[in-house]
Image (cartoon, coloured by chain):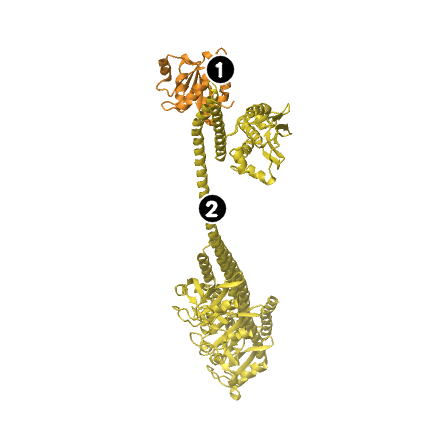
Amino acid sequence: MNSLSLSSVKVLVVEDDPDNRIVITRLLIMAGVEAQSIAAIEGDARDFLDRTGQEFDLVFLDLQLPKKDGYAVLSDLRADPRRAAVRVFALTANVARREIERCRGAGFDGFIGKPIDGRRFSELLRRILEGESVWMED
Amino acid sequence: MRARKRKIEVAEPSLVLYNLSRMTVSRRSESDSVAKVILGLSKTLASTHALDEVLVRILDSIKVVLPMDSCSLLLLQDKTLEVRAAIGFDESPGILGMRLDLERYPLDRFVVESGTPMVIDDVGLDPRWNPRAGDRPIRSWMGIPLRASGEVIGMLSICSWKASAYADEDREVADAFADLAAAAVRNARIFTTARRKIDELDAVNKIGAAVASRLDVDKLCEVVGRNLVEIFMVGVVYVAVWDEDAGIIRLPFYSHDGKRESYPPFPFGNGLTSHVLRSRESLNIGEDLASKARAMGGRSLPGREAHSWLGVPIFSGRRALGVLCVQSYDRENAFSSDDLRLLSTIASTVGAGIRNARLFEEARRKADEASALADAGREISESLEPDVVLRRIAMRANALLSRDSAAVFLLESDGSLRAVVAVGRQAAALQDFRLPAGAGIIGRVVSSGQGLIVNDALGDPQAVSVPGTPEEPGEKLIAAPLFVSGRVTGVMALWRGEAELPFLPDDLVFLSALARQAAVAIENARLHRRAKDEARRAAALYEAASAARAEAEEANRLKSRFLANMTHELRTPLNSIINLAYLIQEGSEEAPPPGIRDEASRIEVAGRHLLGLINDVLDVAKIEAGRMDVRLEESDFRAIARTVLSAASGLELAPGVELRDELPDGLPPVLVDRTRLRQVLFNLLANAVKFTSRGHILRASASERELVVEVEDTGIGMEKTELPKAFAEFVQLDDDMDRRAGGSGLGLPLSRHLVELQGGRLWAESRKGVGSVFRFTLVRADLSRLARAGGERLA
């Protein structure tokens, strides 16, 4: 992971709230990574990624999505051996400990609660790229 | 003594025989027949106790040794001589039983009264001679007295048709035979007496055994009576028992002409039985019974008129308890002194038996009463329905005391008495019968507070008739007051009919005890009712309270869920607000115009503040709902404190305020929920910053048992009375301060909850105008059992 340089990192944001989508994408770009965002994923996430023709290093995944929730999307991704290296982070306003535990159990690489602290976002991203598993407050 | 005497008396005839044989042998030694006669006579005397047979044999023997044509043996009885044996008469059997009145036979009378023998050579020449029935023409006569123990008991009479038939020697021989006859009579009488004594003893033993085995007076009297009938075989036999308290005489046993009959009790008074009881002496009337009985005022008993009456008192110690009585229809003077003695002996046995039976009955009655009282007590504790308990007590009282009717009256508010419970024969008429205040015999019990017995209720001027009940003469009433807390609250009353015995003082003692039980039942029931009412009210209150509490809990639960959802919903827009405000300030290559940047900054700060409020509200809601979970881990306090300090450095500090870390090296590890500890520290620091104009300090030190953390500020401080308010939720001390400093007012109470959830305490010391110190403790991981067991989780 250390080999990842900020500029070569590609991040996918899956977020249904348009404002939040803008905020997160902007924060990512401000931090110096390439970011794309979508509102939802329909069908198998692998097919979807195949169709985009792109590969991502990080996925910031909202848990409450209209068509297919974050856990289902994660399980699609984790079932894809070609994308074993992709790191997936939960991004949600539900910051209950129970939700965090669930995410740990489901195989997320970390949990980012809303609202995000924009002023400390770069530092958070740096820690993520250094391979840390961030679990909200840490 | 008696046995020896008898032996001597029995020996007597042998001696007489010896003398007799000596005399006759000396007179007519040539005669073999004499010896034969004497031998035969001695055999008869030895082998038979039948007096008449002995006497005839004696006469036969005389005929052999003396010249004679007829002779007889007469026994003295009441100034007459009764012929018991005779030979030589034309109709000997017919002469037996004939009585000679001594007044009419002067010669016989002389012999009997003087006790000297008399020999008349020619009765025809003696003017005193009075011919007697069945006599042939008699010329010579010998009258020899029969003597026993110095008394004349009869006479031997020997007659010859020849004049001057008897010489002195003949008189001597006759004397000897007379002695022999006298001895035989005595022996026979002794035998009869002994026989009778044995029979009596048997009877007394039989009665004694029967008496000893019966502990019921009436049954005992029955047995005694049956035995008396068997022993005396007379017209009337009865056993009378005197009930001194009630003044009546009962006849538990009465029989006439061998038939067992029942006879009603009669009052103690002037009759013969009463006379015996009063005088305590036996009474034997053999003549003029009817007139004597009438003179004494006696009543006549059913059956034919009796001619002899014998009654003896039954004693217990010196008290006369009753009378044994036998009466003869057939004869006057039917009862001898022996009968009197026998009846007295039996009476003394019966007396002991009745005393025992009465003691037993008394003991049994006491036991019955005690068990009735115990049962009443048990019933009271079994049931708390006063009507049920009172009914049972009334039934019990009725069963033991009356068997007629019983009722429990309770005092109503207007002073009248109402029969709340009635049992027995007149239950229907008595039930709910109401006595006006003060009326009736029962009213007297209320006013006096004393139980009473009225054995002639109809004769009582105060008596009130109960509608629907007959006015029976001889009706008896017993009543006892019911006392509750020293006041009469009712009366328990029982009735007996005419045929029944009067009530006795003992009955009142027992009824009073039952009345006390009844009063206890009423009082218990009242207390129970009150307790039940109170319990019902309390239960209603409790139900209302728990319903309200359940409602409140439900409302609280809904509130907590609502808040949890709400904060979740709020976070998403806040994410946009805070970060877009930030991006306006910092997100572009070109700096925004100063006005816009400033406004965006205010939006961002306001957003963050709102976020803080939301977090606090959510936490309080979680704590209230009991859903705040705490995960304790062994942690380094200083490391955690440093991250919080660095975050707090982002807080807007007033000029001259600095955060100073005075945490020493080598603090022991603590067992904490890191997130929650950070939250507490941040709250306290933010709080201190908010109210402080000059610097503040974070300190920590370890005690033996725990880690103590201090956050000290030099702020406005608080009065001691304000401190509790600072820890109350949603309260801020100063409205003005609130507006200036912001905040939810939840920081301190929330921090205290969080510290307590981690096993510590949080408190504050403050001086107005000087500043405050907030202290809290944390559990030392090196001392905690949980930590040694290795990072367990607590929920």
Asked if B492 appears above or below B116 in the picture, the reply is: above
Tell me the SS state at disc 2. Answer: helix
C-alpha span from label 2 to label 1: 62 Å
Residue under pointer 2: B542
The amino acid type, in three-letter code, at marker 1 is: Leu
Asked if B530 appears above or below B138 in the picture, the reply is: above
Q: Can residue A99 be seen from the camera position used here?
A: yes
Q: Nearer the viewer, residue A91 or B451?
A: A91
Q: Residue B362: percent from the left, percent from the top?
A: 53, 62
- Identify the subunit bearing mark 2: B
Residue B564, image quadrant = top left
Q: Nearer the viewer, mark 2 or mark 1?
A: 1
| Number of the label disc, if any, that sits on residue B352 | none
Q: In this structure image, what is the colour of chain A?
A: orange
The amino acid type, in three-letter code, at marker 2 is: Tyr
Tell me the SS state at disc 1. Answer: helix
Q: Residue B778: percent from the left, percent from the top?
A: 59, 29
Q: Residue A5: percent from the left, percent from the top?
A: 48, 11
Residue under pointer 1: A129
Residue B649, image quadrant = top right
Q: Residues within 10 Å of mark 2 (few under 14, many from 20)?
A: some
Q: In this structure image, what is the colour of chain B?
A: yellow
Please tell me which residue is depicted at 51% across the width and 24% down the height of the picture: A137
Asked if A32 appears above or below B699 in the picture, the reply is: above
